[in-house]
Image (spheres, helix red, strand yellow):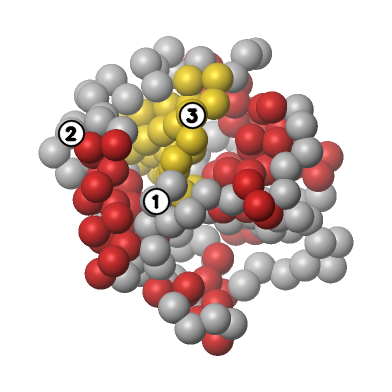
Amino acid sequence: MEIVFVRHAQGEHTLQLPESLQLQNPALTDEGILQAARLPTEIPLTERDIIVTSPVRRTMQTASVWSQSIDCRKIVSPLVSPRMFPQKPDGQTLPCDRILNKDVINKEFPNFVLENDLHEKLWISGINTLPEQAFHLVAQSFLKWCKRQNAERICVVSHDGTITSYRQLIKNEKLTREDFLKDAGWVREIVHL
């Protein structure tokens, strides 16, 4: 099974570090919108693709711009929400990484379907501070879900720490922050389950 991981395009929370990390629900910048608009030429989508996105405004905006002219399934899931990397035992979720309320998602992104699997608690807490062992269980659950979709390809629009955590699990090798994707960067991974 092929999964294409895409890091969201440039968000407002990256413009004036570290103060901008305190922004709630930051959107894409103008540059971020341009980056997302280039994705269709780099990774053309088809109607058979499925996009799974984090329940954060900048990821859903990236997916919206990227899939603008393609009628593919778009699913929002807390299983690909922001994740700290590397994991810090006493780490806390920054305001810029808090998950949007389901009502806000339904209002602002009506073309997206909310994933309502068995992970209701993660719609509140997310995966940002989950201990490694708990994350591995959640990640395996997500990868099995992907496999059951029988899609040509699953495209995951998420965050640098989340993508790196999933890639580390899939590849079964140690990765570092040096492996983070740049804004609107992407990588293909083949998952064998």
Q: Secondary structure at mark 3?
A: strand
Mark nearer the N terminus (1 vs 2): 2
CA–CA distance between discs 1 and 3?
13 Å
Residue 158 placement (x, y as % from top left): 49, 48
Residue 39 placement (x, y as % from top left): 28, 43
CA–CA distance between discs 1 and 2?
18 Å
Regarding residue 139, the answer to whether it shows in the image is yes
- Along the line of sight, the residue nearer the viewer: 58 or 138: 58
Within 10 Å of disc 3 (Cα), the crowding (few <14, some 14-19, many 20+) is few
Q: What residue did someone put label 1 on?
A: 184
Q: In the image as oriented, which residue stretches furthest toward the left?
A: 69
Q: How many labels sit on residues? A: 3
Q: What residue did someone put label 3 on?
A: 188
As displayed, is residue 186 above or below residue 130?
above
- Along the line of sight, the residue nearer the viewer: 184 or 155: 184
Q: Amino acid at mark 1?
A: Ala
CA–CA distance between discs 3 and 2?
20 Å
Residue 74 placement (x, y as % from top left): 33, 37
Which residue: 64% across, 37% down?
A: 166
Which residue: 24% across, 59% down?
A: 34
Point out the frontmost of discs 3 and 2: 3
Q: Amino acid at mark 3?
A: Arg
